[in-house]
Image (spheres, rainbow, N blue to C red):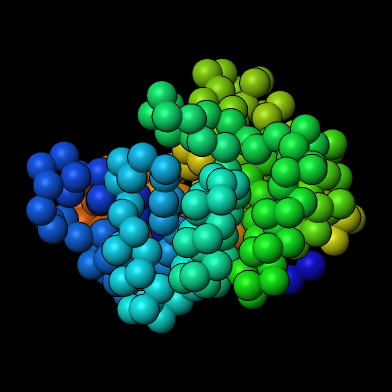
Amino acid sequence: MTDELRLGVNVDHVATVRNARGGAHPDPVRAAHMAVAAGADGITAHLREDRRHIRDDDIVRLRKELSVPLNMEMAATPEMVAICRRERPHACCLVPEKRAERTTEGGLDAAGQRDSLREVVTALREAGVRVSLFVEPEPHQLEAAAELGAPVVELHTGAYCDAEDAQRRDGELARIRDAAARAAKLGLECHAGHGLGFDTAGPIAAIANVRELNIGHFLIGEAVFTGIGEAVRRMRACIAEGRAAGADDPA
């Protein structure tokens, strides 16, 4: 397994601040360029059905202007599939979506939605979009993703990040580690994300089978105090340290 570990930066919540007042500022596309200049390997943007943060024109601009891959997060709906097929970002990540939620609350039920997801995955792959499924780190979800033909899974790290004590966090980390190993055996590229910060990204980066981390809300929050460039650079240092620690510890 290659030691490469990419960092994707999610700019949704720059758009959240913009939309709180309306107008054009702060601009999530500008934030994306700054994140790339600081070392981001890709940019993620979630075009939600209710357009609460990222808007359609943000996706168009990001697709046209970015020098790195754009990963469009989206629900598996006909509207979003049509937009994704038209804009053709480098990749898309299919996520569950509820109108009442503040943020994505869990992984996609790939195992329980095989029939509906199969058509979506096929349509997106035919358009040349690399498809990822955002799933819980559970064997049956990984097996469903492989069966559906998605080349990538992104493991939901929320339970690990939210764990209130060391024992529970260690248990969630072990679950993610086992899932990443299972994904590799199934021929899936493994990404991870949701809730990661400076203190939690390193142990995930240490997992050799994880190839990409996608981090957004935490970095945008830190950017309020330090600027987005410094936040991204510090995160890169955290994951580099974690990766090196993982290389030193084969277990």
Q: Report the residue at 47% width, 61% height from top.
A: 83
The reply to whether residue 248 is visible in this rendering is no
Quadrant of res 106: top right
Q: Where is residue 121 drawn, in percent x and y? A: 70, 57
Looking at this view, is 82 or 12 the one in front? 82
The reply to whether residue 88 is visible in this rendering is yes
Q: In the shown orientation, is residue 122 left or right of residue 234?
A: right
Image quadrant occupied by the N terminus: bottom right
Q: In the shown orientation, is residue 22 left or right of residue 159?
A: left
Looking at this view, is 58 or 183 the one in front? 58
Count of marks, rendered view: 0
Q: Report the residue at 13% width, 58% height from top.
A: 24
Q: Where is residue 21 drawn, in percent x and y? A: 10, 42
Q: Report the residue at 48% width, 30% height from top.
A: 98
Q: Where is residue 8 drawn, in percent x and y? A: 48, 61
Compared with residue 226, is residue 196 higher up or lower down, i.e. above or below? above
Q: Report the residue at 31% width, 71% height from top.
A: 61
Quadrant of res 177: top right
Quadrant of res 171: top right
Looking at this view, is 123 or 182 the one in front? 123
Looking at this view, is 31 or 251 the one in front? 31
